[in-house]
Image (spheres, grey):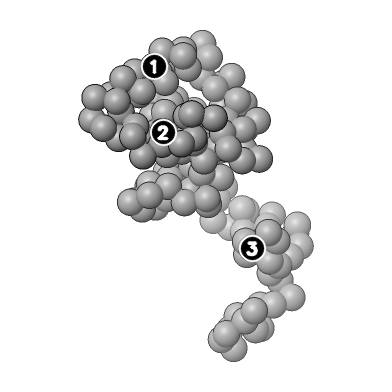
Amino acid sequence: MWSSPTAAAAESALAQRAGLLTYGHTHLRAAVWKRWLQDENTVHEFRQRLVRYFLSAEEPTDRAIDEVPWQLMTLEDWIPLKEFLADLRVFLQMRNSHRKWELHRYWLKLDSRFDPVQVYNAVLVAATASGALAKHNAWLAT
């Protein structure tokens, strides 16, 4: 798991859960938050940086699909959340996996702001007009 002496020294402080590197102890997490993330503006900026990082990829990755909507919801950044969920690639990955209930939860948060039926109708019209929908026909036929 560890490839450098520094990382090996930190092994007892860190843990790998579901493929993600995280704190091995809650007191370490609290110490990091106390030292670097006390200020709400700093936390906000780190969340935005995470979103920008994951959105910089050409295709939405599984990790981006886990992270981006959560961060946007936490930031209460509703328009980018709606746009991320409306991305047909994201929708198909979330709908066809264990994330379908997460997708539903995010739309519940957006419900007073955006109508998911109208949003997805607009996406489907645009995808049909551009020919992008053709590559998803197998899924749509089921």
Identify the residue shown where x is 46% and y is 36%: 138
How far, Cα to Cα, is label 1 from label 3?
36 Å
Image quadrant where residue 129 sits: top left
Across and down, in percent, residue 58 comes to 33, 51
Report the front residue among 14 and 95: 95
Of the residues tagged 3 and 2, which is closer to the observer?
2
Name the residue tied to disc 2: 137
Position of 94 with respect to 136 (left or right) is right
Compared to 139, does 63 lie above or below?
below
Task: Give the structural element (helix, strand or loop) at label 1.
Answer: helix
Of the residues tagged 1 and 2, which is closer to the observer?
2
Q: Earlier in the sequence, mark 1 or mark 3?
A: 3
Across and down, in percent, residue 101 comes to 65, 30
Name the residue tied to disc 3: 19
Looking at the image, do the residues carrying marks 1 and 2 touch, with CB atoms under 8 Å apart? no
Q: What amino acid is labelled 3 in the image?
A: Gly
Using a 10 Å C-alpha cutoff, classify the residue at mark 3 as few (fewer than 14 neighbours), some (14 to 19) or many (20 or more): few
How far, Cα to Cα, is label 1 from label 2?
16 Å
Task: Give the structural element (helix, strand or loop) at label 3.
Answer: loop
Compared to 88, does 64 lie above or below?
below
Q: Earlier in the sequence, mark 1 or mark 2?
A: 1
Task: Give the structural element (helix, strand or loop) at label 2.
Answer: helix
Using a 10 Å C-alpha cutoff, classify the residue at mark 2 as few (fewer than 14 neighbours), some (14 to 19) or many (20 or more): few
Q: Which mark is residue 121?
A: 1
Residue 23 visible in the current orientation? no
